Amino acid sequence: MKIVKWLIALVALLLGLFVLITFFLPTEYEIERSTEINTPAELVFSQVVDLVAWQEWNPWNEMDPDMLIEYGELSAGPGASYTWQSDVAGDGAMKIIKVEGMEHVRFELLFEGYEDNPSYSSLFISEGSSEGSSTVRWTFEGNVGDSFFGRWMSVMIDKFVGPSYEKGLQSLKERCEALALDPEAVFKEVPVP
C-alpha cells in the first residue's frame, strides 16, 4: 500500500512540475531557413508571389496529393489568397499581406482551430554571393496566445516545421534553376506595389 501512495505522490509531483514549467515556456515562436539559388531575383520572385506557381514547390502539397485548393479573387501579388482542405495537413488559408519590391513577400496563415492566432511567413530575396544568383530566406513566426499546449508547440515548432521549410526551399531552388535553363519559359507579369 505504501508503494501505491509513493507512486501517486510521484505522479502528482511530476504533473505539478509539468504545469509549472509550462508557464515559463515562450508564447512566441520563430524559425528561419535559407538557401542560395543560381538564378536572378526576378525569377525567384515570380515563383514566390504567384500562388499558382507556389503550388509547384510547396512542400505540403506532396504530403497530400488530394489536397483541395481554392484561390481567392487574386492569385498573385498583394491580396492574393487561397484556402486548402486536407485530411493529412488540416484546413487553412493563406493570404499575401505585403509585397516590398522584389525583395520581400509576407503571408498571413490561418490554421483551422487557431484562427484567433494567425501565423506569418515571409520570403526575403536578396542578391546572392555570385553574379546572377539569389539568396532566399524563409521565416515563420507567430504567437500561441494563452494555449497551454501551444506553449509546448512553440518550443518544438522548429523540429516540426523546419524540415518542411528546408524541403520547400530545395524544391524552389530546383524549380527556379530548371526554369532558368528553359529558353521557352515565360513568366507572367506580377503586380508589384
Image (cartoon, grey):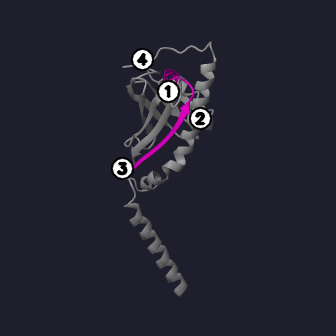
- Left or right: residue 128 versus residue 26 is right
Say what amino acid the circle numbered 2 marks. Answer: Gln
- Left or right: residue 120 versus residue 134 is left
Say what amino acid the circle numbered 3 marks. Answer: Gly
Front-lying residue, 111 or 28 = 28
Tell me which label, 2 or 3, sits earlier in the chain.
3
Tell me which label, 1 or 2, sits earlier in the chain.
1
Is disc 4 in contact with disc 2, using a CB cutoff of under 8 Å? Answer: no
Tell me the CA gap for discs 1 and 3.
29 Å
Residue 78 appears at what percent x and percent y? 39, 23
Tell me which label, 4 or 2, sits earlier in the chain.
2
Q: Disc 1 designates what residue?
A: 48
Tell me which label, 1 or 3, sits earlier in the chain.
1
Front-lying residue, 81 or 38 = 38
Tell me the CA gap for discs 4 and 3.
34 Å
Q: Is residue 111 visible?
A: no
Tell me the CA gap for discs 1 and 2.
13 Å
Q: Disc 4 designates what residue?
A: 191
**Residue 72 sits in quarter:** top left
Front-lying residue, 38 or 185 = 38
| Residue 170, numbered label | 2
Tell me the CA gap for discs 4 and 1.
12 Å
